[in-house]
Image (cartoon, rainbow, N blue to C red):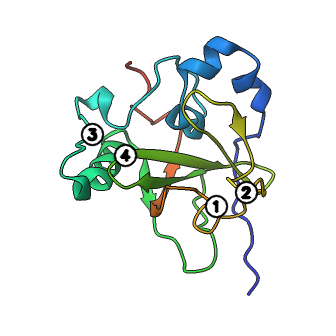
């Protein structure tokens, strides 16, 4: 089955996120996926007074998902084998059950990239392979794929507040 790669306006430019220690340490995967440097270590829903629920563990992923929706991101249904054609910038949310969340973004080169917490931005998974699809790459303990979303820097409300 041939799957065309959806377009993206995000460009993989790790130097923007990695070459300045202040930027690298104060922006996380949510900032990176949205392609907005705020130096606030953004959290899903925080600008809308939503605090992510960590207990019970089963609700953690749903709470992160809800925060993303509050922030103005739009869920995109994904076909079984191909990536969804979002028409904007495509990002993916994955969950480490009860512990953490993580985002990947599709770049204009057709691969996904990501930035884990305070670590450098990169375009490879935990096995050092380029990321064609975050549903199937090596995500380590992030075992739950929660979904795809579109993000638009002119509509997103999540990163304006710390």
Q: Position of residue 26 (x, y in %)?
A: 54, 19
58 with respect to 74 (left or right): left
Q: Quadrant of the N terminus?
A: bottom right
Q: Quadrant of the C terminus?
A: top left
Residue nearer the viewer, 14 or 110: 14
Residue nearer the viewer, 2 or 119: 119
Distance between the Cα atoms at labels 2 and 3? Answer: 29 Å
Q: What residue does disc 2 label?
A: 127
Few, some or many C-alpha atoms within 10 Å of disc 3 (few <14, some 14-19, many ≥20)?
A: some
Q: Which tag, 1 or 2, sits closer to the chain's start?
A: 2
Distance between the Cα atoms at labels 4 and 2? Answer: 21 Å
Q: Which tag, 1 or 4, sits closer to the chain's start?
A: 4
Q: Which tag, 1 or 3, sits closer to the chain's start?
A: 3
Mark 2, mark 3: which one is toward the viewer? 2
Few, some or many C-alpha atoms within 10 Å of disc 2 (few <14, some 14-19, many ≥20)?
A: few
99 with respect to 36 (left or right): left
Residue nearer the viewer, 56 or 86: 56
Q: Position of residue 133 (x, y in %)?
A: 66, 64
Q: Which tag, 3 or 4, sits closer to the chain's start?
A: 3
Distance between the Cα atoms at labels 1 and 2? Answer: 6 Å
Q: What residue does disc 3 label?
A: 52
Q: Residue at x 61, y 34 (%)?
A: 35
**Could you tell me if the residues under marks 1 and 2 are in contact, i.e. CB atoms within 8 Å?**
yes
Q: What residue does disc 4 label?
A: 99
Q: Residue at x 73, y 57 (%)?
A: 127
Distance between the Cα atoms at labels 1 and 4? Answer: 18 Å
């Amino acid at each position: 089955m041939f799957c065309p790669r959806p377009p993206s306006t995000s460009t993989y430019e790790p130097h923007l996120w990695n070459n300045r220690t202040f930027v690298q340490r104060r922006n996380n995967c949510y900032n990176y996926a949205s392609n907005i440097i705020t130096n606030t270590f953004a959290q899903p829903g925080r600008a809308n007074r939503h605090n992510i629920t960590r207990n019970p563990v089963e609700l953690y992923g749903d709470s992160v998902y809800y925060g993303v929706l509050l922030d103005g991101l739009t869920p995109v249904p994904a076909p079984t084998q191909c990536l969804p054609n979002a028409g904007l910038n495509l990002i993916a949310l994955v969950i480490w059950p009860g512990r953490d969340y993580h985002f990947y973004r599709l770049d204009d080169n057709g691969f996904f990239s990501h930035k884990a917490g305070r670590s450098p931005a990169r375009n490879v998974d935990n096995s050092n392979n380029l990321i064609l699809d975050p549903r199937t790459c090596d995500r380590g303990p992030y075992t739950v794929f929660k979904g795809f979303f579109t993000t638009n820097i002119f509509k997103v409300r999540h990163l304006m507040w710390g």
